Image: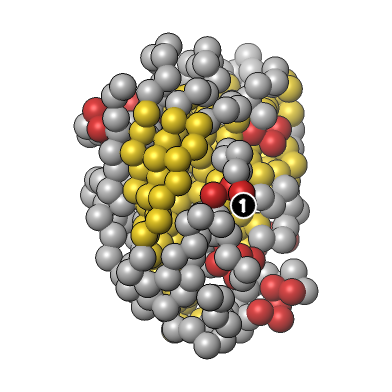
Amino acid sequence: MSKATSQGGEISRRQLLGLAGGSAALLTLGLAGVGASRAAANESLTPQAVVLASQASAHGVVADPTLIPPPIHRTTPVHHEVLLQARHLWAEIAPGAKFRFMTFQGQVPGPMIRVRQGDTVHLTFSNTANDYWHSIDLHAVIGPGGGSDATRVTAGQAKSIHFKAMYPGAFIYHCGVPDMDYHISSGMYGMILVEPEAGLPKVDHEFYLGQNEVYTRGVFGQKGPNNFDFKAMNRSRPTYVIFNGAVNALTATRFGAMRARVSQTVRVFMVNGGPNLMSSFHPIGNVWANAWLHGALANAPLHYVQTAPVPPGSAFVGDIVLGVPQTIRLIDHAMSRVGLGAMAEIEVAGKPNPALFRAG
């Protein structure tokens, strides 16, 4: 079997202090690559990197939505070795406003793990030099706590699990300690994609987004360090609702929009970490031509869905057919959340199609 290798007692949260740790990233890519096609981004991947692609971002914890493993074309199962690390770091959530994120591999969302139905995985989870317990609960894992019971580690520890990817789908993984709502809100979630045996329909581009809400004692955009607000979390009153770890991170006015061209098809993988709010995921100026609600890839997709409900702790896979040049804005259609940072953009270049749309 081939192998794909990547780098990468309970304590009260009020008693513990986080300390930023190091992470061995598989690749080093900034968000300058955000506009590149998925195929171009994956040209940099070695054959050993097809399960998990992680990054050291030039923009704090913001995950490059194009830096994901490529589609799987093989017809037989294989075994994978995956290493993930828990890492804390301060980063800008809005210009000048800093927040201490808890992450998998230093990015939000955590790296996409991509396997095929029937594959086996040996996953080792380690905790860098900080004073919090962490673990990993993968919703694709059939076992105690989704693996979280066996992977609970404190500073300097590492533990492993072995599992078989039984069912196809897009599944969330997240920290699974007792204070998991705090850890998830702080960025500790990601997606494990289990492709069906027959694979997925071909598209021109794939993008990977994660949505979560963040609760701080400081108001929206407050400069300097912003501490976590547990009372606000318990009331589900977020300061920020964000894609990929920062306010409007994946837009032209921040770190760069995703890019594609007229006549192409793009696929968006979205995982909602929550921990509390459902997302009403909508592409302004288009619809989801194929929509796998809840990431349920074993089922036929719905067609021409305007707004997809994505509950916290779930995922979504949707395709968009690009008919005209425009900027498609991906938003949470609970519209007040757009003002809290929940917007990403796909810039679509190409020739106008007046038969499909024209002004006047």
In the rendering, at what x and y percent does residue 135 appear?
50, 60
Residue beneath the point at 63% across and 80% down: 229
* Amino acid bearing label 1: Gly
Question: What residue is rendered at 70% in x and 44% in y?
Answer: 310
Q: Position of residue 152 (x, y in %)?
A: 49, 62
Which residue is denoted by mark 1 in the rendering?
Answer: 145
Of residues 115 and 209, the one nearer the viewer is 115
Position of residue 66 measured from the top left corner of the image (x, y, whole percent): 39, 38
Q: Is residue 308 left or right of residue 246?
A: right
Quarter of the image containing the N terminus?
A: top left
Q: Secondary structure at mark 1?
A: helix
* Quadrant of the image occupied by residue 269: top right
Decide which of 141, 102 is in the foreground and name it. 141
The part of the image, by quadrant, that contains residue 233 is bottom right
- Which quarter of the rendered picture does the C terminus lie within? top right
Q: Residue furthest bottom?
A: 15
Q: Residue at x 63, y 14 (%)?
A: 355
In the rendered image of this protein, does residue 252 appear above or below residue 133? above
Residue 356 shows in the view: yes
